[in-house]
Amino acid sequence: MLRIFLKPHKLIALILYFFWDLLTSSIQVAWDVVTPRLRAQPKLLRLPLDAKTDGEIMATANLISLTPGTLSLDVSEDRKHLLIHAMFAAKDPEAAKSDLKNGIERRVLEVTR
């Protein structure tokens, strides 16, 4: 019963996190565009998914794609991985994966489960 009351709190946390991520990544991409030195180091990431349902996968993929500098490209046939193009991930791909898993995906799962 308590979980019902926590869901709106988790949804608000997801929305706030997404807007913060949107703001910081927008600044990062804009800075890369307006400065002469190219900082972008793109990389394709194969992100393992904890999301299982269509809704969880769709929400995770769409929120990632809405964030500047990242784009969800495909879901593996077994639905266990998400292929993502990340603009600033080549230097440390594992950190980029960790940020996505512990950021957007974790918060989506907190709302949906």
Image (cartoon, grey):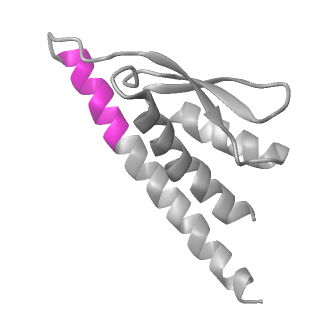
- Where is residue 61 drawn, in percent x and y? 65, 36
Residue 22 horizontal side relative to residue 111, left or right: left
Q: Is residue 59 above or below residue 83?
A: below
Residue 31 in magenta stretch: yes
- Where is residue 65 drawn, in percent x and y? 57, 31
- Where is residue 2 drawn, in percent x and y? 71, 89
Q: Residue at x 50, y 36 (%)?
A: 97
Q: Is residue 95 above or below residue 101?
A: above
- Where is residue 100 drawn, in percent x and y? 51, 42
Instruction: Tell me the quarter of the picture where residue 8 sits.
Output: bottom right
Q: Residue at x 37, y 28 (%)?
A: 92
Q: Is residue 100 above or below residue 71?
A: below
Q: Start and end of the magenta stretch?
A: 24-34
Q: Quadrant of the N terminus?
A: bottom right
Q: Residue at x 58, y 58 (%)?
A: 107
Q: Quadrant of the C terminus?
A: bottom right
Q: Which sits in the foreground, 100 or 35?
A: 100
Q: Which sits in the foreground, 112 or 33?
A: 112
Residue 87 horizontal side relative to residue 56, left or right: left
Residue extending farthest to the bottom is: 1
Instruction: Count how many numbered circles sit on residues in the image.
Output: 0
Q: Residue at x 33, y 23 (%)?
A: 91
Residue 104 in magenta stretch: no
Is most of the magenta stretch helix, strand or loop? Answer: helix
Residue 7 horizontal side relative to residue 9, left or right: right
